[in-house]
Image (cartoon, helix red, strand yellow):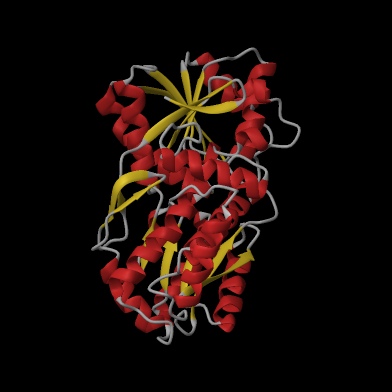
Amino acid sequence: MKKFGKAVSVLACAAMTASLMAAPAMAEGTFKIGGIGPMTGGAAVYGQAVMNAAQLAVDEVNAAGGVNGVQLEFNAQDDEHDAEKSVNAYNTLKDWGMQMLLGTVTSAPCIAVEAEAVNDNMFLLTPSGSAVECITGDNAFRVCFSDPNQGTASAQYIGENKLATKVAAIYDSSDVYSSGIFATFQAEAANQGIEIVAAEAFTADSKTDFSVQLQKAKDAGAELVFLPIYYTEASLILQQAAGMDYAPVFFGCDGLDGLLAVEGFDTALAEGVMLLTPFAADAEDELTQTFVANYKEKYGDIPNQFAADAYDGIYAIKAALEQSGATPDMDASEICDLMKVAMTEITMDGLTGSGITWAADGEPTKAPKAVVITDGAYKAM
């Protein structure tokens, strides 16, 4: 991505004008990309970040000439992190003429939508749907790590960096994201010399009072509490742990990204919280710094991992479209047949990894990273 100065000389303007007059006309038609995610409700931090970053990337691609001269259109729909509403949003986008989907954002809605997309042979690239079941069809790919990969990588990171030997876990047994991560974390923990001294579950109907789970972790002598959950519940756990004078290391996955934006939450309680993520906004590489600056200028906020996943997602779609030779007059199924081959042929340097590739099963290959919350901000570890 290039940096553009805000001031352009008169001679440069004249040169640009002449160049534009001489340039060939843009190709007819557009590639229509749908987006689905929670832009309102409890998971809105994720959905808003995805849609903002996707639009930012689409605008950049279009300003640079599009995809082989074809402009992109992006249509974002809110599903409120609800599977039924997500399917309704999918059907709305189909009526609009969607040819490919960046979504959905969260796992349970993505599973429901992916079933529809398989039947339609609609190309689907989820930026952050991490459950295994999100990409069962050969039409579906993801940018983020899968839940099994997150659970295994978390145990390995804790073990290899000797963060703790006695670990407790608090997870949502009613959620495929949370329970999936915990299952593989538990399986890998023994290989890393980690003893799980307490494994405490909660459900969607009991996710406000965590005093029992925390007390069991404390009584078991857990030095670290693993939280493969979303940021809303994590904020309550941190508040309640502080109230009972329990201060272990807290370690989570991408669901904790958004913790610092919880309304009314004292971010001082998150000091020292660690999470696996492929993106750190304070990274010093030029691509990250430019993205963060442009995102902040346009939206007034620091982008999170979900924004980075979506931004990479649009550029992956661009690369695959260019590789595939698809044209905007093709229907969604024709484009999908080309895209699912092209995705396995591209290599991309993005915000969330260098040399990212995709296998035919839709899984990306890239290295995990970790961040720690320090002074109210995410810092690369």
Task: Between residue 324 and residue 115, name the one nearer to us.
Answer: 324
Q: Position of residue 131 (x, y in %)?
A: 42, 53
Q: Residue furthest right?
A: 264
Residue 309 shows in this picture: yes
**Residue that appears at 76% across and 32% down:** 264
Task: Between residue 296 and residue 312, name the one nearer to us.
Answer: 296
Q: Position of residue 228 (x, y in %)?
A: 48, 37
- Which picture quadrant has residue 316? bottom left
Q: Is residue 235 above or below residue 326?
A: above
Q: Position of residue 375 (x, y in %)?
A: 60, 20
Q: Residue furthest front?
A: 11
Is the C terminus in the top left, top right, bottom left or bottom right quadrant? top left
Task: Between residue 250 and residue 175, name the one nearer to us.
Answer: 250
**Residue that appears at 44% across and 82% down:** 27
**Residue that appears at 39% across and 17% down:** 164
**Residue that appears at 62% across and 43% down:** 296
Task: Between residue 102 and residue 1, name the one nearer to us.
Answer: 1
Q: How many marks?
A: 0
Residue 128 shows in this picture: no
Q: Is residue 267 above or below residue 320?
A: above
Q: Position of residue 367 (x, y in %)?
A: 31, 39
